[in-house]
Image (spheres, helix red, strand yellow):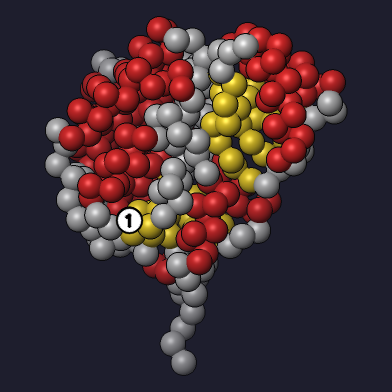
Amino acid sequence: MIAEQYGIAFPGQGIKAQTLRSALWAHVRHPLVARLLTTFGAADPEALDLGDTSVVQPATFAAGLAAADTAFGPDHCPPVALGHSLGELTAAAYAGFLRTDEGFELAVDRGRLCHDQSLRRPGAMVAIVGADAGELEWLRRSVVAEHGEILDVAGLNSARQTVLSGAPEVVAAAVRIAGEQCLRAEVLPIPGGFHSPLMMDAVPTWRRRLESADFRPSTTRFVSAIDVRPHTDPVQVREQLARGLVLPVRWHEAVRTVRDLGVPGLVDAGPGTTLLKLGRRARILEFTGLGALPEPVPPG
């Protein structure tokens, strides 16, 4: 089994700042990272504000593509590409549905849009670990009944890890009630209620921006974590990116789709190892990192 048979996966925004900064330093001479620094007037990665969504999203895009490009070269054509949240934009660019430079500009615009929307409608996100579907829904409805505000499923990362999204005080209540129910709750380092109705007001602007971009067909299949289907039609790829601001990330199901397509494994391109850890816990198919790719099997 060789690396070319593996698909490639890119993470979303919830990467720890130091992990993202280290990834940028590792590829600081890559043109995308250089463009990132120029865009934000930073001399080096230390000068970037990685607590700001408008910076973090293009930084995550640049770090992921720089790492994959360094590992595989410019002509790599994986059988599938997929991403988690923002990572879907990275995956679409890597798969060739749009030029890398245009993908970067979209990441800049998406970051600013998400930042501005989170100021207008503040939100937060929390990962609930160890709850089955019934326990999770009891938790969610308990919080909604108490507060009467939005608390929606934002991400289905695995059979035992679900992300909820809502206003900060509602997420705080979810953490409290999770503790009462002996469930583990971890607030994510993401300053916004992404993948929930809190983002709906931003969709028209984001859709218009996507429609202004030059999406094109690709032979690499884009597996959407929004509708969990493979796509080669650029119109459908664009539509999934638009809906992804509000709809939940169905990561667990998307990985199953990759398996059902006959792809033997996925490479987590990073930054970080979030997807690698999720994949190894779920055991749906083989996951590896860029630094641990399997060696080619000699012919015969």
> Could you tell me the amino acid type at mark 1?
His
**Residue placed furthest toward the bottom:** 300
Q: Nearer the viewer, residue 253 or 10?
A: 253
Q: Is residue 115 visible?
A: yes
| Residue 276 visible in the displayed image | no
Write the residue at 66% across / 10% down.
Answer: 147
Please state which of residues 185 and 202 is positioned toward the viewer in this rendering.
202
Name the residue at 49% across, 25% down.
196
Q: Is residue 158 above or below residue 53?
A: below
- Residue 238 location in percent, x, y? 27, 42
Query: Residue sitting at 35 percent across and 12 percent down?
Result: 116
Would you name the residue on which mark 1 appears?
231
State the image coordinates of residue 106 (x, y, percent, origin top left).
Answer: 25, 31
- Residue 17's x, y, as percent? 51, 24
Q: Quadrant of residue 220?
A: bottom left
Q: Secondary structure at mark 1?
A: strand
